[in-house]
Amino acid sequence: MDFALSEEQTALADAEQGWLVKNDPLLYRRPTIDDGQARISPKALAHVAESGLLGLLTAEMGGCHVDLLVLCEEHGRAGSAVPVAELATTCEILERIDHHELSEAASGETLTLPVLDSLTSPSLSAQIDGTRLRLRGTTAPATGLPDAAQLLVVATTQDDVDVAVVVPVESTSIRALDTLDLTRAWSVVDIDLDLDATAWSPAPAGTVARLRDQLATYRAVDALGAAARLLDQTVDYAGQRTQFDRVIGSFQAIKHHCADMALAVEASRAALWAAAVSLDGSDTQARTRAVAAGAAFAGEATRTIAQTALQVHGGIGFTWEHDVHLFLRRIKVDELLDGSVSHHRRRLVSA
């Protein structure tokens, strides 16, 4: 694949990076890190809403998944709690089902986030009884739910019909999860609802599978952003830290570590660009292969980058005050959610 970012996409990434540098999410998070789950900064949410990023994938905005990829990578690099990909994909689905909540979701007036059944332990049941829909069970972990006003529940019924339901969070039970990740809030949702015909919508065939591929891609992209940040920090540290009266970056072993990290970052980025391009296409088999390959490769690569960064930083990397552990934790959680490395390798083999 002969591919490169356009000038507009590069400018979009640069602009978002500039805003995140000026409004550092980790500085916002650090004072409350011992007080509970991370919350989305109102200023950050207002920024993505006013910039039109929430409706990026809608026909009105005309954005594509590569546009969303560069944004999500920057939010991963910054350690942001804003679930940009989830918010954008929600608006895309709302537009596909012609839902009246689209304008509120795209403007940020109502924070609406998607939830799905778990991949590893499915328990969310959807049954159509006449014109009514019954939803029972527990969703997969999702981020940002403490700040959400509504949930977009996307499920497949026992008759293999994809359905989409927008429900207020008050009609469900949200259970906070205690995870390694200190930069985002993770929760599951317990659902027990009986909905009449006006409260739910049939979704286009393949909506659930498409959303799973989107979330898997952007989970890996988030880890890529965090890994790129660790690479920059490691190179800077290696150029400053001295041992035996020499900067450690002059040692061949450290050079090799940094070179391996840089190679893994660039290779992961290329694999995930291919996945993002496939998300805009109509070939579901090609999409499955590209997403599975990108998520599996980037999942293992970013994990190795995080371990190497910790090793090169030495003792300071283990301290609470240094940011290395925050990005390492984020990468580990990204690796386990929306399909593990092993899961995506199995998908790739069978695709």
Image: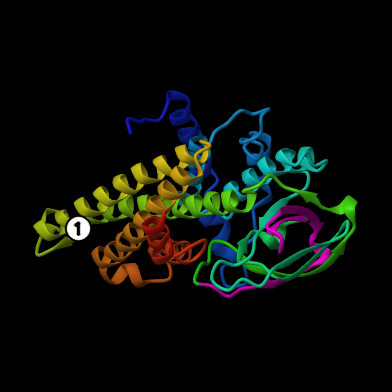
- The residue depicted at 63 percent of the width and 34 percent of the height is 51
Nearer to the camera, 349 or 90: 349
- The residue depicted at 74 percent of the width and 43 percent of the height is 105
- The residue depicted at 54 percent of the width and 72 percent of the height is 179
Looking at the picture, how far across and down is residue 305, in whole percent? 30, 59
Mainly helix, strand or loop, the magenta region?
strand
Which type of secondary structure does the marked residue at label 1 adopt?
Answer: helix
Q: Quadrant of the N terminus?
A: top left
Looking at the picture, how far across and down is residue 289, in whole percent? 41, 49
Q: How is the image coloured?
A: rainbow
- Whether residue 2 sits left or right of residue 250 in the image: it is right
Q: Amino acid at mark 1?
A: His
- Span colored in magenta: 150-179
Q: Count neighbours of disc 1 (C-alpha within 10 A) and say few if under 14, some if 14 to 19, many if 20 or more.
A: some
Residue 194 visible in rendering: yes
Looking at the picture, how far across and down is residue 218, in whole percent? 50, 50
Looking at the picture, how far across and down is residue 16, in whole percent? 51, 38
Nearer to the camera, 66 or 239: 66
In the rendered image, residue 175 lying in the magenta stretch gets the answer yes
Picture quadrant of residue 98: top right
Nearer to the camera, 246 or 343: 343
**Above-or-below relation of 276 to 336:** above
How many numbered markers are drawn? Answer: 1
**Above-or-below relation of 206 to 50:** below
In the rendered image, residue 243 lying in the magenta stretch gets the answer no
Residue 46 visible in rendering: no
Judging by the rendered image, the residue that carries numbered circle 1 is: 257
